[in-house]
Amino acid sequence: MAAPRKYPDELRDRAIRLVLDAKAAPDGGGGNVYKRIGEQLGINPETLRGWVKQVEIDNGTRPGTTTDDATRLAELEREVRELRRANAILKSASAFFAAELDRPSR
């Protein structure tokens, strides 16, 4: 289960939009955009940097694993774990029943 979010979604969206707009400005936002906007909105600059990085990845402007791909990968990994567990159970059950068949009847 995911941890509760510290920042509301509206604040997160606004902060990301402000950073992207500042970076798109002709002067590139000047200075440390993340620090300036983070201080204005009360957000840790590194948190803001991570949000912007993930949005850029999701938009295809930066290489990396998109949010959708990461979610799908986590689902597939969970499914693989479940299938491996089921296989282990079936193997032990088949070994048990094979041993029962090999025992001489009375």
Image (spheres, helix red, strand yellow):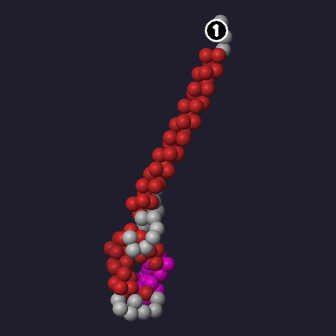
The location of residue 25, given as percent across then percent down, is 35, 89
The residue that disc 1 covers is 105
Which residue is at a point 50% across and 42% down the rendered structure image? 82
Q: Quadrant of residue 84?
A: top right
Nearest the eye: 41 or 55: 55
Which residue is at a point 61% across and 24% down the rendered structure image? 96
Which secondary structure, mark 1?
loop
Which residue is at a point 64% across and 9% down the rendered structure image? 105
Q: Quadrant of the C terminus?
A: top right
11 vs 45, left or right, is left
Q: Amino acid at mark 1?
A: Ser
The location of residue 72, given as percent across then percent down, is 42, 55
90 vs 28, left or right, is right
Q: Quadrant of residue 7?
A: bottom left
The magenta span reads 34-48
The location of residue 68, given as percent across then percent down, is 39, 60
Q: Is residue 36 above or below residue 17?
A: below
